[in-house]
Amino acid sequence: MKKALISILFALAMANMAFSQITVRFASRLALNGYIQLDSVVVENVTRSWTERLVYPDTVLVFASSSIAEAQGWNIGLASYPNPFRGTATVSLTAPESGNYTLRLFNLSGQLLAETAQRLEAGTSLFDISLREPQMALLTVSSAHGQKSLKLLNSGRTSGNAIAFRSNILATNKMQSNQPFATGDLMRYIGYATYNGNQLISTPIEQNQQVSESLTLLFSADLPTVYTNTPTNVSTTAASCGGNVLSDGGSPIISRGICWSISQNPTINDSHTSDSTGLGTFSSNITGLTSGTFYFVRAYATNTNGTAYGNETFVLATPENYINPLPGVFSISATDQIHFSKGNLQYTNLGTHVVAGGDTVRGTWRFAEHQWETIGTANSNISSTYTGWIDLFCWATSGYHDSNDIYNTHYYPYSYDTNSVSRQYNWWGYGPSLNMPDTNLVGTSANYDWGVYNAISNGGNTSGMWRTLTAAECDYLTRLRTDAAQKWGVGFVNGVYGVFLLPDDWTLPQGLTFSAGMNSNNSYTVAEWAMMESMGAVFLPSGLNRYHKDVGGTAAYYWASTNFYLQSENSNLSCFHFLSSSGSGYFHGGGLRRCFGCSVRLVTNSK
């Protein structure tokens, strides 16, 4: 059968002709039967969120490097090869003009691991990156042209952390282009062909495109075609994954799922799940992982002719005590700084977790996967038997109870007020009673704080790693730190309304705008927010509030660990909130009684 080729030319218009273009040529092959005629190839740039279909014989697409800055608001290009990597990696930095550039490598606790400053010529320069131990890290580059950051995932070990300049290899010129592309972008390729009157879909190829090469798209008229999703919700021992069975190969799908191993190309002879039958998408839970270990992951699908595997991806089981906070550093006093958690706190009655003191108790705590995520009206299902997730909690409902506190009987995360009659010693019914030495969530009552008492499954999975801001810290953060009035605003992320907090050291990503204050009306897509978040921005979504089982309101309320107002029989207010109405708002301390359900965003001290 005739060999068919489709070539895609990623022309970077480079001055040095030895690096004049990246060309990807596609051949197609039918398993056991030689080559098959390609009808088309779908090319997806995962990094920059665009998709292009090439229909044979149209064979060439040209992408100019200058269009990247116009499309994403960046003048600096940054990519790593490979990523993930085992100990060492090569980073390419594309500089629009000659000048001074500073590269810094941080762990996700904000600790500086390595730094180098270099004068670079216009074009692409190469740096060698080394990381001492398995971890996720953040590489930032800054210059007079702006800043950019890149997350790195390391599964190996070296003798130390380092950034070393290797060489300046190319210079680039500007060209017009319909689609943005940069060396190292994550690309996905899927081929389509016709065989005996049936349309076949190739096994997807997904990779960081660094060099010119020839790829073979594999088709099978007998076996299924399946795609592997990227793992999410990664913890020390588990992760969520799944896939999509695109075709059944002409026979019914009798099993499908995910397989994983510490070796490449895992099969169903390794650890695997079994997730129903048939075509379409499916979800899987990867379990039994060892913390800090790197695993290869593939989806599989089996029909009566055999088993086919999807593209290979990876997961790094979170190392023990790896808390993974957001990168931004925020001052909460003249001497202290913190990082925020990756999302609002959530709880389910399912599973178990370890608490301060070492006991294992019922339930699972986690942070929302994205900053804008909230549970919303489903919080009305709160009860001791409800097995869904909730994220609106009465004050001090960490699950901890001091045996000497005989007046407090409502301390579980699923507690809710069923009686409006006040209690004599604990006016609103929650938290340390007024007869206790510490009536706030500090000192001898610190375990009443959700983060102090509980292990957060995707936040280090160890108690005592997180905490709630005090009222004084909230006040300093929003009013008293340097340029505080210019470092908060309101608006939308992915259509969700909330408040924005900017870190102490803030640089706005090029191509984006930000307005501060109560009359701001900022709005960001998911891709735009990823740029804001990489520079340290925090978003507190309006998660509403709950009274008994009634969920509603237009303001976002977040608990503090101490009172904004003097605790007394008539004033027991421990939340900070921003009042909102379609794009305007302001911060205010206090406002709800402790029996209300409010959002919780935990913090960890900056090291």
Image: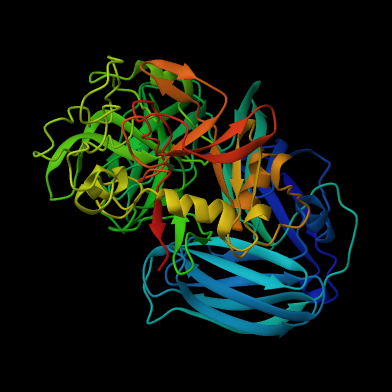
Left or right: where does residue 140 sit relative to residue 73? left
Q: Where is residue 160 drawn, in percent x and y?
A: 40, 81
| Image quadrant occupied by the C terminus | bottom left
| Image quadrant occupied by the N terminus | top right
Left or right: where does residue 264 sit relative to residue 539? left
Q: Where is residue 344 drawn, in percent x and y?
A: 44, 39
Residue 132 or residue 169, whichever sits in front? 132
Residue 468 or residue 42, whichever sits in front? 468
Left or right: where does residue 454 sit relative to residue 307? left
Image quadrant where residue 539 sits: top right
Above or below residue 411? Residue 178 is below
Left or right: where does residue 494 sit relative to residue 519? left
Q: Name the residue located 64 percent from the left edge and 70 percent from the top edge.
A: 141
Q: Name the residue located 32 percent from the left edge and 33 percent from the top edge.
A: 347
Residue 279, visible in the rendered structure: no
Q: How is the image coloured?
A: rainbow
Q: Where is residue 369 drawn, in percent x and y?
A: 46, 40
Q: Name the residue located 61 percent from the left edge and 75 percent from the top edge.
A: 103
Q: Where is residue 212 drawn, in percent x and y?
A: 69, 62
Q: How many numbered discs?
A: 0
Above or below residue 355? Residue 484 is below
Residue 417, visible in the rendered structure: yes
Residue 236 or residue 128, whichever sits in front? 236
Residue 123 or residue 338, whichever sits in front? 338
